[in-house]
Image (spheres, grey):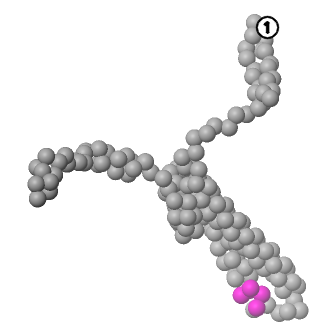
């Protein structure tokens, strides 16, 4: 009984420092690290959203504008193809205008399909770029370029220097 009571009375208690623990939690919250999968899914759903999530602010407007342009042009050519198809269905199949309208319809449909393929490519690049930007968010290592070219003003004109690092 004595040892048990002595342990409670004279024993040293370990106290945690709540301030230090809160500082580590705050520093973890302050250091943002985007999840590459979330960034890719956001870009798949909304153009440029993954780049915004990964905080690559200048990548987002490029993808937003590129994808919007491709969809707009595909819509325009699709609407033109529909109008030409309706016009062609009203024409006499043996008339002169029938073949010309058919050619215009083919061109409009081909342009529509081309812009849809461009959109698919831009969407794929959007998703991959968002994934890579999020994955390399804290990548701080700088690449050492082995070739350096300098053009400096000199007394008689310009001085050209080429340095190759091995």
Q: Which residue is mark 1?
A: 156
Answer yes or no: is residue 133 visible. Answer: yes
115 over 30 or under it: above or below: below
Residue 11 location, x and y as percent? 17, 48
Task: Tell me which residue sits at (39%, 50%) in the image.
Answer: 28
Main secondary-structure element of the magenta-colored stretch = helix
Task: Tell me which residue sits at (87%, 89%) in the image.
Answer: 95
> Magenta part of the protein: which range?
85-89
Residue 124 location, x and y as percent? 67, 65
Relative to 97, 154 lies left or right = left
Task: Answer few, some or many: residues within 10 Å of disc 1's Cα (few below 14, many 20 plus, some between 14 and 19).
Answer: few
- 93 or 5, which lies in front? 5
Answer yes or no: is residue 73 visible. Answer: no
The quarter of the picture where the C terminus appears is top right
Furthest residue in direction front, as rendered = 2
Task: Tell me which residue sits at (52%, 54%) in the image.
Answer: 54
Residue 1 location, x and y as percent? 11, 59
* Quadrant hosting residue 143: top right
* Quadrant hosting residue 127: bottom right
Relative to 74, 134 lies left or right = left
Relative to 160, 115 lies left or right = left
82 over 89 or under it: above or below: above
């Amino acid at each position: 009984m004595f040892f048990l009571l002595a342990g409670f009375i004279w024993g040293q208690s370990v106290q945690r420092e709540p301030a230090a623990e809160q500082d580590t939690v705050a520093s973890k919250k302050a250091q943002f690290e985007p999840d590459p999968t979330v960034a890719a899914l956001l870009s798949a759903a909304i153009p440029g959203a993954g780049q915004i999530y990964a905080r690559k602010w200048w990548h987002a407007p490029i993808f937003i504008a590129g994808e919007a342009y491709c969809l707009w042009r595909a819509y325009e050519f699709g609407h033109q193809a529909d109008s030409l198809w309706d016009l062609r269905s009203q024409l006499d199949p043996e008339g002169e205008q029938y073949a010309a309208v058919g050619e215009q319809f083919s061109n409009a449909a081909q342009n529509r399909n081309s812009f849809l393929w461009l959109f698919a490519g831009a969407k794929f690049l959007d998703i991959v770029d968002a994934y890579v930007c999020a994955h390399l968010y804290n990548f701080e290592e700088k690449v050492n370029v082995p070739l350096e070219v300098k053009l400096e003003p000199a007394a008689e004109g310009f001085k050209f220097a080429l340095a190759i690092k091995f």
